[in-house]
Amino acid sequence: MDVSSRFLGELEAALAALRAGGTGVRLPAGPGRAGELAAAFNALAGSLDEAAAAGAKEDRLRAGLVRLAAGMRGLTTAPALAALVMREVPPLVGAPYGCLFLAEGGAQRGREDEAGDGSGDGPGGGKDAGRDGAGGGWLVAAAGYGLPEGPEAPPRRFRTGQSLVGQAARDRAPIVLADVPPGYVEVASGTGSTDPAVLLLLPVIAESGGPVLAVLELAGLRAWNRAERGFLDEVAGLLAGRLSLLAARAGGAEQLARADGLAVDLAARSAELAARGRELVRSAADLKESTERLAERDREAAERDAELHRARGELDDRARALARTSLYKSEFLANMSHELRTPLNSLLILAQLLAQNPEGNLTEKQVDYATVIHSAGSDLLQLINDILDLSRAEAGRLAVRPEPVLLHRLVAYADAAFRPVAEEKGLEFLVSVAPGAAEELTTDESRVRQVLRNLLSNALKFTAAGRVELRVAAADPDEPPEALRAANGPVLAFRVADTGAGIPADRLEAVFDAFEQGGGGTSHAYGGTGLGLSVGREIAQLLGGAITAESEPGRGSTFVLYLPVRYAARYEDDAFEDDAFEAGAFEAGGFQEGGFEQSGFQGGEAGPADGGSAEDGS
């Protein structure tokens, strides 16, 4: 096996691994063009691995958010909530330092008339920076992660507008310090210490423009990405909802205690008022139950909204990832096409000239070698064309150029192209047009020829004895698939029948999958790429038609191409603009240069110009 064949084998295996979702797939570096292609493939594979790693990171963040929400449900105090948040959140975003400040003595609304912008000498402005500040409630450190002070140190306290903690509460907006000066805060462990690179102060604000309930302070050794920032915003929203719920419950309990005390006083003064007091107690109990029910409904609604928001975000992220993957694949295929077609152009012309031996100065064995070279180059060219056509079809970018086409031209083309192949194999080859068939149809002639080449090439390849027949007739109204019957207008049926090996019933649909063969799997006993029928079905659908198959093992197969007489576009034609896809004088199924056509040599292979597409999609 030469270097090019071995490299192509490795490339096909690597592409299959990527398609199966594998990671860490790489091609070995090498010299020349193969090395350049390997480098391009490795760059693409690396980008896909990075995208997969980013997706895994987002999955971990979502799982952490779900775990945090579940842990909050059983907690009934704000300090317990703060401890849970500091235990779960900093490790998920890679923050070696964190502190959560809870509002004390009333929630902080960040009023502009509150004076004081204190500063400090550490994260949040220092230990005592807020004690002499101006008006507003206090923000008190309730829980921390990796704090440098010992357990005996008093908790940090700041007023609204004092230090960066208080300023974040007043502004009701996050504060990010991208370049933290050395010594501002120290991240320490048992083996050493360092300075963080970024500092974030995130206010926790109640819903509907409510008060500031807390401020979350985090220090990191790197900047947080968009997914991590989004995760922190969701944590802030989740914490705000839980703190609001705890405050509402505390207020309800105070109201209930006040009502009970009033009922006792009234009962002591008057028996009549005592009855009314008992009624008031019952009313207060009902009010508490209603308040709890409303709070539970609000919480459930908030959870549903958060879940919907996360689901929408996940769908958007996956759509963007798929779009990036499709773009990388298209760019890679375009580059591969351009680089491989250029040398194939010269190789096919030279091989065909040598095989024709116009001056008679080559031996018979040399002519055979030239024929083999031409056949192998043709197979490689068809593999490139099939892969590119399949990629275009999957991306919805396969161009269709409809024009009036005479039916007898298509039939004459099929007869002239495949009769020599059938005679060489000793097969009977029949071509017929039924009376009543439309003499002209509007479609893309080159695409129809490409599909017919695949179907006839498959039939000849898999038929060892007997006959291969192409019959063209007007389809009965109930004959085409239901989707095609819904389109008004006559339909032509191009029926390719053979007496070959046949296909098992459970494999009929699988043969239309890429790289599949009728016998099952991707091991191609009859040669071919396994792409012909897959590309053919995509082209038929773009032409407004369809392909169906019937087969019986040992008796042969029948493939039918249904095409509307008048083409009606299903999609807006949108041809590739990339020069790499259109580079070279290549047609969809054949190569032409200087008057030589690829179909001139078959070297015993079934089917002209396609390198032999297999009945199972090869």
Image (tube, grey):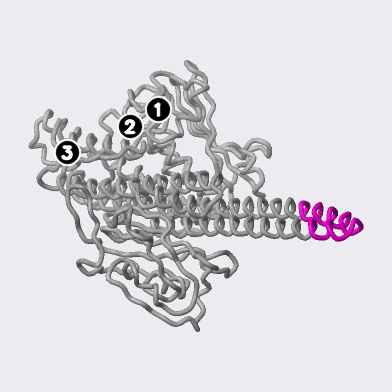
Query: Observer-nearest residue: 198 or 550?
Result: 198
- Binning the other alpha carbons within 10 Å of mark 1 as few (below 14), some (14 to 19) or many (20 upward) gives many
Q: Is residue 374 left or right of residue 429?
A: left
| Dot 1 or dot 3, earlier in sequence | 3
The amino acid pointed to by label 3 is Ser
Q: Position of residue 479 (x, y in %)?
A: 64, 35
Q: Nearer the viewer, mark 3 or mark 2?
A: 3
- Position of 492 relative to 141 (above/below): above
The amino acid pointed to by label 1 is Gln
Q: Is residue 422 left or right of residue 111?
A: left
Query: Observer-nearest residue: 7 or 502?
Result: 7
Decide whether residue 569 is among the magenta residues: no
The residue where tag 2 is placed is 528
The residue where tag 3 is placed is 4
| Dot 1 or dot 2, earlier in sequence | 1
Q: CA distance from mark 1 to mark 3?
A: 25 Å
Q: Residue furthest front?
A: 268
- Position of 561 relative to 239 (above/below): above
The residue where tag 1 is placed is 517
**Considering the numbered disc 1 on the image, is that residue within a helix, a strand or a loop?**
loop
Q: Position of residue 118 (x, y in %)?
A: 36, 77
Q: Is residue 600 visible?
A: no
Determine whether label 1 and label 2 are within 8 Å by CB.
Answer: yes
Query: Observer-nearest residue: 243 or 512?
Result: 243
- Position of 304 relative to 351 (above/below): below
The amino acid pointed to by label 2 is Gly
